[in-house]
Image (spheres, grey):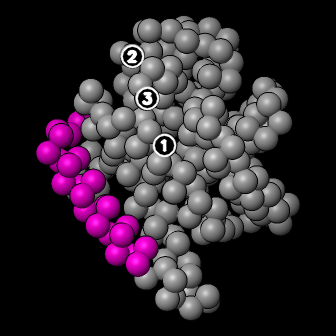
Amino acid sequence: MFRDKYKNSKYFRENIEFNIESFDELKDLELSVPKERILDITSPLSMYSRELISMCFSIGNPLNEVFKWFKISLRYYQLSYGAFESIYDLIDYLSLGVLFEDRKEEFIEDVEKIFSKYQSFVDAGEQYEDGYIDTLALYLLEGKVENFRSHLEYLNMIGDDAESVIESQKFWYYAHSEASWYDTHKTEDAYYGYWSFDTAALCKMRGIYDERFKDLDFFPYDLLVQEEN
């Protein structure tokens, strides 16, 4: 089932093909690159595969394919993640981990390494700290559901009921005005889907499920309910 609200299937097919080709070309070079230049490979490999996560979900591909690209992208993100990076990407990766929790044995080691890096960067003053990052990581690593305070106010609005989710989702897009992907739907080739993986992950952790979420802009309902194999 096609899921995106801004572009058509032709757009996504063409961009998925481009990303896969670009990913494969870089993958072929990975073993031949000197160690001191490995970030020149792992960082774009993470980027191309990260975009494939959203594009495959947007076009309506099976969730198994979405998970495949998530696992691949998480591995390269773990290798390339450094200081002073965007918390939006980190929150998205950990949120997707929560949504794919039933298969976390396949990627939990990468989560552990990423969270360890994050903590060391925060301690060194080299990474913006956000309470939701800790909450997502502790849920994946220890099974704990904790309260938090995030600089993303729409997350702080969410309680234990569907109404608070529906209200907070109205602010999700505009809260990301500083994100690199903001307004990319107005471009010809830079858009790969707007999905509030973080909101859906919080719903899963707090056990909030409601069919009205299907109608919310940007809410990845199929990832929350996992009805598709």
Ranked by sequence position, the earlier of labels 3 and 2 is 2
Q: Which residue is mark 1?
A: 67
Is the Cβ of the residue at disc 1 closer than 8 Å to that at disc 3? Answer: no
- Look at the image and say whether residue 124 sits in the magenta stretch: no
130 horizontally vs 184: left or right: right
Q: Nearer the viewer, residue 128 or 15?
A: 15
What's the amino acid at mark 3? Answer: Asn
What segment carries the magenta color? 4-28
Of tags 1 and 2, the one toward the viewer is 1
SS type, badge 1: helix
Report how far apart the C-alphas of labels 3 and 2 lie in the structure: 18 Å
Closer to the chain start, of discs 1 and 3, is 1
From the image, tell me which residue sits under label 2. 214
117 left or right, relative to 89: right
Q: Nearer the viewer, mark 1 or mark 3?
A: 3
Circle 1 residues within 10 Å: few <14, some 14–19, many ≥20: some
**Numbered circle sitting on residue 229:** 3
Q: Identify the image quadrant of the C terminus.
A: top left
Please identify the quarter of the rendering in which residue 23 is found. bottom left
